[in-house]
Amino acid sequence: MQSLKELWDYREMLGSLVKKDLKTRYKGSVLGFLWTFINPLLQLLVYSLLFSVIMRAGIENYGMFLFVALVPWLFFSTSLMAGASSIMGAQGLIEKIYFPRIIIPISVVCSNFLNMVFSFIIVFAALLITGVGLNPAMGFLPVLMAIEFFFALGLTLIVSAVNVYFRDLEYILGILTQVWMYVTPVLYPIDMAPEAIQGIILNVNPMSSVIIAYRDILFYQKFPDVSTLLMTVLCAIISMIVGVLVFGKLQKGFAEEL
Amino acid sequence: MAAIEVENLYKSFKIYSDKGKTLKERLLFKKRRAYEKREVLNGISFSIKKGETVGLIGHNGCGKSTLLKLLTRILYPDAGTIKVEGRVSSLLELGAGFHPDLSGRENIYANAAIFGLKKKEIDERLKKIIDFSGLEDFIDNPVRTYSSGMYTRLAFSVAINVDADVLLVDEILAVGDVNFQQKCLKKMRQLRDSGVTIVYVTHDTDTVKTFCNRAIWIHEGKIRKDADSWEAVDAYLAFMNDEKMRELEKEQEPVQEEQPEEPQVQEDINDEQPPAEEPIEDALTEEEAPAEEAELDSNHFGSGEVLITKVRFVDEQGEVLDILKCGMPVSLEIDYQILKEQNGYNFGMGFFTASGINVFSTNTNIDNIFPEKLPQEGTVRFKIQNLSLLEGEYKLNVAVVNADQAPLDYYRCFLEFAVASENKKAVGTTYIEHTWEIPQA
């Protein structure tokens, strides 16, 4: 409770870190902040061209099919990856000044989250242009994003703290997130996988239902299956609890370990 | 009311000789994980009242900076509790968290936010911060274009304008130019007078005396003295002086025992031709050795017909001194041995700084003493009522020449000695008795 109040007191710092990250991410480039939008737009174009012209995937509008899933997946995986090295990246701050350490991984997840939101602006624009249009199911999108946010945050808290003591984690995570992406229906529809594996993908991997839900809402324009999401909600809650506890325990040694 | 309450604080660091942080290193080199545990703080308790200004003093590595880091909550204690009331601002490392690509103004916001300030609070202080830094013209330039002085000025301005209840300061006033330093000190005094609790870590004991009302001397991880700042600082300085003396004693012992007994050198000199005659007054008062003498042994020469066998400093009771103190009565005793009678004797001495500058030199002839007959062996005493050499390292020249000023036994730098100073503080080589007169307001 105490630390929650403290976190609130330091919200300005959180805001400033996120702002700093978004502002300086493309610093020095001519287009600057515009890259936040251009980047996903170009990606979308590449995927659309690649899969509709060169590699025909047999799915209509595959570029869009992929993009609506890839954006939330990238939020998740880059949060984990960037989060893992975030404490070490903030070494200068941590050794010199006090602030609630938890702000660092939170700011990483937040800035990646905002990046996803900006990418969704492109998604919506593309949806309107390609004639897919909007639908009432999109009202569920914020809830879905919130679930994914907390799941990602919980895991990021754990990896960011553990990585200070065990620096292999960063590299292990690099491979792990790749594998994780392939066992999540990002590149393919779930029914493309052999039926025996489908169950595992759906029941063991909490990200599957999240990605499927994004695609249902944005691509197929239908309400997602809320019941499959319950498992993810549970995972998000557990990961948050474990994350906060682990981080709280490990952060005491940060200044010494770095 | 206590602003800072520290109880039974323990902190140790693990010193790894070579720590493996990756999986491979951990698995392969188990031995490397061997570490040594170093106790830095060993049960420290104190309580600082609101509005107190406390200096933390102690020699390097005594744990005072660790204590400060524990107070700022950068480090966590192994055992014990720390309670700090109110908002804390630390001037430990200035400019932590400055982003080089953001402008000065943006960095003010970012940096103040790290201190836990909200947007509104920063808005209110912005003008004050910019004014204090004196960087109005550069405030919208990226910080990477700043000079290091400008950088610290901006950082100090932010940290000092946070309006903290507790200010933790680590030796940072050596930043910026003289004017800015004075501005900082003035601001710190204002803060102190307005009731801000300040904990100040520094080696500058004079500042502790004048700025703080209390000082805590930490020694080997424990509180050695916690008292009024003057009292604690004086106790600390006395201790450090003793330490220094002990160290010097160690250094000096071999020098004193070896130097006087150098039969080989003396015999060699006996065989060699005596150097050209030279009036001893000149020799003792000149800084540089004449070139011809350098061929022999520029530091020890003479006919050897009279030998200086031992030289020492003694106090009033005749006890041999290894370290001299400014202001004390000292006698320089020169033991001699006459191998061949001379037509007269002239004993001389000289004090030189370590770098070879003559501080004071004289001889018996200069002082109108012309001994013609002396016992075969004896001791000449050069008595000083009140040693006016200031703290430092010195060299001693001693010499004896005959009535014709021919060197009999002449030592440049017979021994090196140290002078410590407990209460006579001044800069230079010589203490001059003085008083000050200041106009009354």
Image: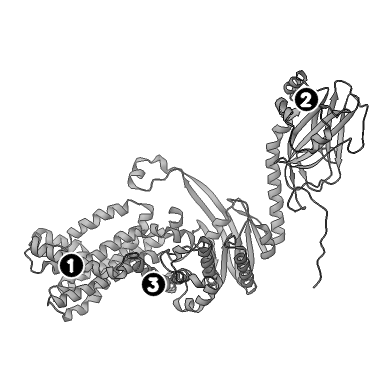
What residue is disc 2 on?
B275
Q: Which mark is residue A44?
A: 1
Mark 1 or mark 3: which is in front?
1
Q: Nearer the viewer, residue B67 or B361?
A: B361
Q: Amino acid at mark 3?
A: Gly
Q: Nearer the viewer, residue A211 or A59?
A: A59
Q: The C terminus of chain B is located in which quarter?
A: bottom right
Which chain is disc 3 placed on? Answer: A
Colouring convention used in this rendered image of the protein: one colour
Q: Position of residue B386 (x, y in %)?
A: 84, 46
Does dot 2 land on a helix, a strand or a loop?
loop
Q: Are marks 2 and 3 in contact (CB under 8 Å)?
A: no
Residue found at the very far left of the displayed protein = A58
Local packing at callout 2 (Cα closer than 10 Å; few below 14, some 14-19, many 20+) is some
Q: Nearer the viewer, residue B151 or A189?
A: B151
Number of marks present in the image shown: 3
